[in-house]
Image: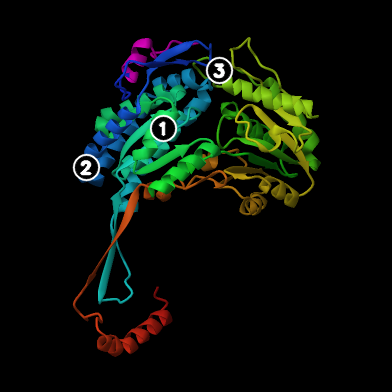
């Protein structure tokens, strides 16, 4: 393991930025050894309310600063993230147990999100005129008003990139942010925040709190003007219910049971490599990774051989460098969930095609990437999200069968099609029920396309992050209309009677001219 600047002194410096008035702390372990990495201050509900109040004050000045100033600050933050990438990579690895390559995806995503929102916010959110129902008589324009303070609840698995994907568009839109960081990802978030503060974001504008969801998360969803949540479908439903009662908006990216379809025109080795990465990046602890693999029977045998060979040859490790293909599960709870799903499947008749073993010789929570065959509906792993190092392989006989099987899920977050024909892949993509579909890639094509919306259908969430949609969720559209004085609109019965024929003629003329 190479030397790192991620020292206990740095951890203390970063965690001092957590809004916490008490002295209670939470020990946070590192997956590489299971030992305590640092002590994280614990926030209270009162701390959350205080952070939101101070963010509201800071937001008033931030929105008045205007698009040009916000763009300048965010682009400076973009450069600082690149400058500090080695430290950010170290922190991601130490907290999550993922490989250097998978940590790099997070840092690259954060820079892409920052650059897009800095440069797109003015174009997307500037006020603009709209056509009125009576041209020249009434003028109409729409302006966008920031919603205030966004409450962002971020999970541990992709803490840095998911933070950027919600926090940055909120800042670009003129909002303040109070973010609840998961204990296991707080250092990465705090280091990312530090880059933004050093770039010119006011400290109170982006506050970070930490602690149990039952207290800190509940307090944040009680007072925020908009809520961003990434996590389980069960928790997302509770947040949606509370947001509905409060009549505030919410953007929820929830669970998935994502499918990869392998068609009969693929190169088996290439398809196996894409499947391996698409299923086991971050050890499957990724909302858009695949847990269901549907393979056309015509290529099943060579594909399975290639997949087994590649997984057996993959290197597992936790070194702070580009040394390993796969890392560790993130916690003891994650390991227990993977082992429980595997034991249930095997007891009910499933076969382990490859993997299936913990690797305590590498670290306490390492587990070999595992592919199962013979999975049936009575097994937990069949329809329930594992969110870990297990994927199930099924044989299909046609494109139609593959699509029907992939769509036969309560979830619809991400999907992938592996094919030798892009046209064929596009046809299947149009038939899949998922918020994003990747052709000849597991998830990164859609995930990295920050100018396009990302989110789920069915039980995988509501709302979208990224793209113009990701910015528009943080603003309220305000319509402003004015009469020009060219014609007085009717107010009395006699005036309505006099103008009705003219207005009907106008409606017919506008239709004939194809004017909306």
Label 1 neighbour load within 10 Å: few <14, some 14-19, many 20+: many
Above or below, 206 against 25 in this view is below
- Report the residue that reaches farthest toward the front: 245
Name the foreground residue: 26 vs 509: 26
Q: Which residues are magenta?
A: 1-15
Q: Quadrant of residue 48?
A: top left
Q: Position of residue 480 (x, y in %)?
A: 26, 63
Q: Earlier in the sequence, mark 2 or mark 1?
A: 2
Q: Residue at x 71, y 36 (%)?
A: 382
Spatial distance from mark 3 to mark 1, Cα to Cα? 37 Å
Q: Position of residue 250 (x, y in %)?
A: 42, 45
Residue 292 shows in the view: yes
Was residue 157 drawn as part of the magenta stretch in this picture?
no
Q: Secondary structure at mark 3?
A: loop
Q: Nearer the viewer, mark 3 or mark 2?
A: 2
Q: Earlier in the sequence, mark 3 or mark 1?
A: 1
Q: Earlier in the sequence, mark 3 or mark 2?
A: 2
Q: Nearer the viewer, mark 2 or mark 1?
A: 1
Was residue 14 drawn as part of the magenta stretch in this picture?
yes
Q: Secondary structure at mark 1?
A: helix
Q: Which residue is mark 1?
A: 217
Label 3 neighbour load within 10 Å: few <14, some 14-19, many 20+: some
Q: Which residue is mark 3?
A: 323
Q: Position of residue 334 (x, y in %)?
A: 58, 23
């Amino acid at each position: 393991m190479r030397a790192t600047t991620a020292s206990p002194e740095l951890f203390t410096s970063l965690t001092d930025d957590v809004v916490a008035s008490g002295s209670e702390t939470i020990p946070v372990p590192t997956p590489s050894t299971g030992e305590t990495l640092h002590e994280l201050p614990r926030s209270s509900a009162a701390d959350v309310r205080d952070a939101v109040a101070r963010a509201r004050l800071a937001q008033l000045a931030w929105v008045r600063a205007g698009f040009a100033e916000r763009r300048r600050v965010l682009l400076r933050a973009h450069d600082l993230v690149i400058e500090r990438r080695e430290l950010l990579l170290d922190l991601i690895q130490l907290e999550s147990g993922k490989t250097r390559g998978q940590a790099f995806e997070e840092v690259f995503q954060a820079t892409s999100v920052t650059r897009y929102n800095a440069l797109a916010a003015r174009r997307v959110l500037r006020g603009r005129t709209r056509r009125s129902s009576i041209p020249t008589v009434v003028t109409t324009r729409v302006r966008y008003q920031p919603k205030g303070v966004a409450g962002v609840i971020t999970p541990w698995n992709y803490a840095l990139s998911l933070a950027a994907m919600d926090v940055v568009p909120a800042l670009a839109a003129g909002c303040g942010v109070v973010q609840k960081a998961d204990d296991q990802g707080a250092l990465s978030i705090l280091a990312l925040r530090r880059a933004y503060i050093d770039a010119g974001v006011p400290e109170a504008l982006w506050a970070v709190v930490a602690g149990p969801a039952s207290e800190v998360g509940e307090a944040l969803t009680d007072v925020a003007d908009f809520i961003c949540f990434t996590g389980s479908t069960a928790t997302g439903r509770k947040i949606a219910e509370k947001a509905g009662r409060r009549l505030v908006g919410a953007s929820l990216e929830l669970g998935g049971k994502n499918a990869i379809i392998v068609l009969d025109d693929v190169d088996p080795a290439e398809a196996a490599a894409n499947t391996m990465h698409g299923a086991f990046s971050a050890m499957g602890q990724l909302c858009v990774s695949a847990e269901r693999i549907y393979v056309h029977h015509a290529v099943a045998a060579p594909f399975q051989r290639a997949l087994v060979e590649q997984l057996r040859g993959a290197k597992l490790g936790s070194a702070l460098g580009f040394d390993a293909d796969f890392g560790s599960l993130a916690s003891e709870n994650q390991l227990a969930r993977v082992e429980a799903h595997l034991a249930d499947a095997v007891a009910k008749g499933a076969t382990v095609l490859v993997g299936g073993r913990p690797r305590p010789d590498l670290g306490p929570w390492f587990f070999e990437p595992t592919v199962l065959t013979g999975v049936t509906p009575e097994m937990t792993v069949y329809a329930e999200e594992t969110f870990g190092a297990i994927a199930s392989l099924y044989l299909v006989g046609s494109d139609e069968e593959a699509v029907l099987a992939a769509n036969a899920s309560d979830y619809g977050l991400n999907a992938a099609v592996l094919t030798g024909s892009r046209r064929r892949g596009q046809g299947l993509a149009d038939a899949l029920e998922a918020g994003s579909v990747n052709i000849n890639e597991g998830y990164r094509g859609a995930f990295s396309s920050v100018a396009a919306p990302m989110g789920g259908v069915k039980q995988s969430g509501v709302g979208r992050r990224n793209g113009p949609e990701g910015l528009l969720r943080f603003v309220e559209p305000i319509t402003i209309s004015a009469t020009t004085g060219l014609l007085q609109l009717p107010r009395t019965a006699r005036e309505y009677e006099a103008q009705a024929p003219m207005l009907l003629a106008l409606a017919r003329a506008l239709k004939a001219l194809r004017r909306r």
